Amino acid sequence: MSHELKQPIAAAMTNAKTCMRWLKRDHPDVDEALEATSRILKDGTRATEIIERLRSLYKKDLPQRELVEVNEIIREMVELLRAEANQYAVSIRNDLAADLPKITADRVQLQQVFMNLILNAIEAMNETGGVLTVKTQLGEDGQLLISVSDTGVGLPKEKTEQIFDAFFTTKPQGSGMGLSITRSIVESHGGRLWATANNGRGATFHFILPTSADIVRVSDTGT
């Protein structure tokens, strides 16, 4: 949860400093300050939504479903996390199929999925740098096929399923909840999440999501 909240809080602090800088000028630029303030409000709203959605995971509330564009959510999360990636010399590439159908999903929960997977990939390359690729395509069965791959340290041998267990982690400061929550969200949307080792360096996390509202399971994320 700390990683998920870190991003909007850090963005809000940056925008607050920017706002102060505009107002401290000999001739304060009120318009620029207002824009920075607007971004702070957006960041605060984002943090609140993350907290509420995480609470709903544990309370087993019904998700708030709407028609969403997966590629749009990916672009939002990539933009939000680009500074984090740059800090570790990680290049993010999008390979997004055009004209994908919208799906019925909880927007904030899908944002959580992409945030968790992208942050996980960045952390896998935080000592070496590398390339992170997010790919979308439409499968022959009409489902969305999505993958997040990295060129990092790879997966623990023979533990490609155990990494999704609650409290399992290979990171010194990890909580072991990120991938567990991510899989729960994907499964609550009628999808499936799994991981594979790359032929070269790194790993790829794959997941599928149904595109028809008729086959989306309206269930809690604990199912």
Image (cartoon, grey):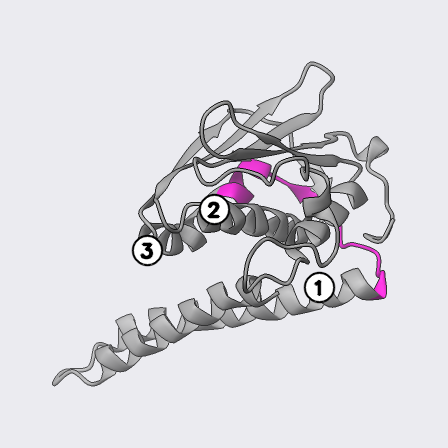
- Find residue 99 and report its image quarter: top right
Judge whether 24 appears above or below 56 on screen.
Answer: below
Amino acid at dot 1: Leu
> Can residue 42 be seen at all in this image of the molecule?
no
Q: Earlier in the sequence, mark 3 or mark 2?
A: 3
Relative depth, front residue between 29 and 64: 64
Give neighbour class at mark 2: few <14, some 14-19, many 20+ (Cα, 10 Å): many
Per the image, is 60 magenta? Answer: yes
Q: Position of residue 95 (x, y in %)?
A: 46, 28
> Would residue 207 appear left or right of 219 to someone viewing this image?
left
Q: CA distance from mark 3 to mark 1?
A: 27 Å
Relative depth, front residue between 180 and 101: 180
Residue drawn at x 57%, y 39% is 155
> Would residue 192 appear left or right of 3 to someone viewing this image?
right
The local secondary structure at tag 2 comes to: helix
The local secondary structure at tag 1 comes to: helix
Q: CA distance from mark 3 to mark 2?
A: 13 Å
Q: From which residue to which does the magenta span run?
A: 59-74
Q: Position of residue 187 (x, y in %)?
A: 78, 42
Q: Quadrant of the N terminus?
A: bottom right
**Tally of numbered tags:** 3
Which residue bears the numbered disc 1?
Answer: 54
Q: Earlier in the sequence, mark 1 or mark 2?
A: 1
Q: Earlier in the sequence, mark 3 or mark 1?
A: 1
Closer mark to the observer between disc 3 and disc 2: 2
Which residue bears the numbered disc 3?
Answer: 87
Which residue bears the numbered disc 2?
Answer: 124
Per the image, is 40 magenta? Answer: no
Closer mark to the observer between disc 3 and disc 1: 3
Residue drawn at x 61%, y 71% is 48
Give neighbour class at mark 1: few <14, some 14-19, many 20+ (Cα, 10 Å): some
Disc assigned to residue 157: none
